[in-house]
Image (cartoon, rainbow, N blue to C red):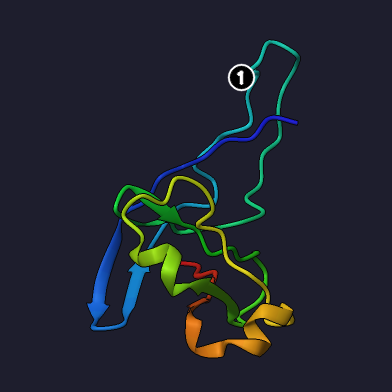
Amino acid sequence: MPNISIYFEMTRVSSNAWEGHFYRDALQNAAYFGLGVCHWDVIQASPAFSKHGENFVPSSGLGSDTPYIEYFKKSDFLNKSQKDGGYGTASNDPELAKHPDAFFLVTTTVKEVTP
């Protein structure tokens, strides 16, 4: 199944909040791959934050205003030589329960707005 990424700008709206907008219908139904008409829909929106060239990518689905919380290791975020990882961990991770101060959280909320 083809996977297409659409980049959208994020704007800082407060000291701890960012906001971005994208168009759900950015890809029109068409024969992009020469195999007939592809019908597209957005299934996920994931902002990527960079530090020291490493991306930290919290995930979230669409269709719910429920915030999605993901935890990241502070040591990964501060490590200038970090070459892998950068993906969050779930709230039920045993390491998070043992060392909660070693993590920071990112809350992502996706809201669909119609004009």
Give the structural element (helix, strand or loop) at label 1: loop
Q: Characterize the local packing of mark 1: few (<14), some (14-19) or many (20 or more) Cα atoms within 10 angstroms.
A: few
Q: Front-most of 71 and 111? A: 71
What residue is pinned by disc 1?
32
- Residue 7 occupies quadrant: top left
- Residue 33 occupies quadrant: top right
Whole-percent x and y of residue 102? 49, 82
**How many labels, in total?**
1
Query: Would you say 9 lies left or right of 34 here?
Result: left
Query: Please, is residue 34 above or below residue 39 in the view?
Result: above
Query: Would you say 91 lies left or right of 109 here?
Result: right
Whole-percent x and y of residue 41? 66, 46
Of the 4 image quadrants, the one containing the N terminus is top right
Q: Front-most of 78 and 115? A: 78
Residue type (three-letter) at the residue carrying disc 1: Tyr
Query: Please, is residue 104 above or below residue 52 in the view?
Result: below
Q: Front-most of 58 and 35? A: 58
Q: Residue at x 33, y 79 (%)?
A: 17
Q: Residue at x 73, y 81 (%)?
A: 94
Query: Please, is residue 4 above or below residue 104 in the view?
Result: above
**Residue that extends furthest to the top in the rendered view of this protein:** 34
